[in-house]
Image (spheres, helix red, strand yellow):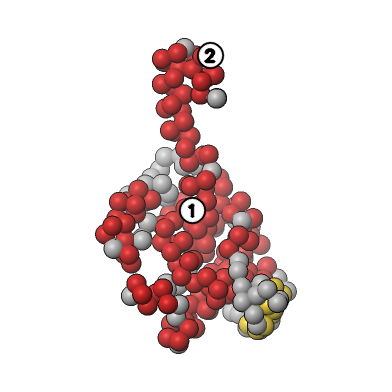
Amino acid sequence: MLNSRPHPTRPLIKYGTLLLGALLAGCNSSSSLDPTPTQKQITIKRDKFGTPHVYANDTYGLFYGYGYSVATDRLFQMEMSKRTGQGTVAEVLGPDYLQYDIATHSRFDPENIKQQLAALSPEDRAIFEGYAAGFNKRVKEVLADPALMPKEFTDHDFKPSTWQPEDIAMVWVGLILNRFFSASSEVTNLDLLTQLQKEKGQEEGLKVYQQ
């Protein structure tokens, strides 16, 4: 059942495009990709510190290379970030995480995330679509060659999943907004303020709350 009540994530998806930079890491090498559907060349060059630098002719291509680089360097971490943000951890790590997943499902509306992505400008949507497509290219390479599979997947006996554009958004919404933004605690804060004002009066209760 979808949650139709107002939710703090609703007006904020567009700002997630500013935070994707926090997901990039690296190791040495240089490669060229030929993405679809643009068929424009993308080049990824690694500097001496292993940091990938992506060169492309458009936004889609830039984030295609970006997603590919992140998947190359951090495939397991990103898989678990997605599962943590969407409440599917128990599927792969067992029933100890079931209550966490249930709580996570109460915090977001997946359909609303999709609607917000659809409402973005084509240029902004290209960020999420390109990132997901580039990420999936690496996932397909890993699934086709067991030697590329990160050890953590083997240890926990599951395989990496492919991504949709909304999954990229949910990494931000689920892990950053819900954990670290004050918007996610507004109801709790309001309850605390209300209780303090009942006990101490309007002015004194507010003063205590603001300390």
Q: Is residue 20 above or below residue 100?
A: below
Q: Residue at x 30, y 51 (%)?
A: 99
**Tag 2 secondary structure:** helix
Which numbered circle lies on residue 200? none
Q: Is residue 105 above or below residue 201?
A: below
> Disc 1, disc 2: CB below 8 Å?
no
The residue nearer to you, when weighing 166 against 138, is: 138
Residue 151 image offset from top left, x and y in percent:
42, 77
> Is 91 positioned to the left or the right of 17 in the image?
left
Distance from Cα at disc 1 to Cα at disc 2: 35 Å
Q: Residue at x 38, y 50 (%)?
A: 104
Residue 6 image offset from top left, x and y in percent:
46, 39
- Mark before the other along the chain sequence, 1 or 2: 1
Q: Residue at x 31, y 61 (%)?
A: 90
- Is residue 166 something that shows in the picture? no
The residue nearer to you, when weighing 30 against 88, is: 30
Amino acid identity at mark 2: Glu
Amino acid identity at mark 1: Leu
Circle 2 crowding by C-alpha within 10 Å: few under 14, some 14–19, many from 20: few
Residue 40: quarter of image: bottom right
Residue 7 image offset from top left, x and y in percent:
46, 42
Which numbered circle lies on residue 175? 1
**Tag 1 secondary structure:** helix
Q: Is residue 156 above or below residue 169?
A: below
Which numbered circle lies on residue 203? 2
Which quadrant of the rendered structure holds the C terminus?
Answer: top right
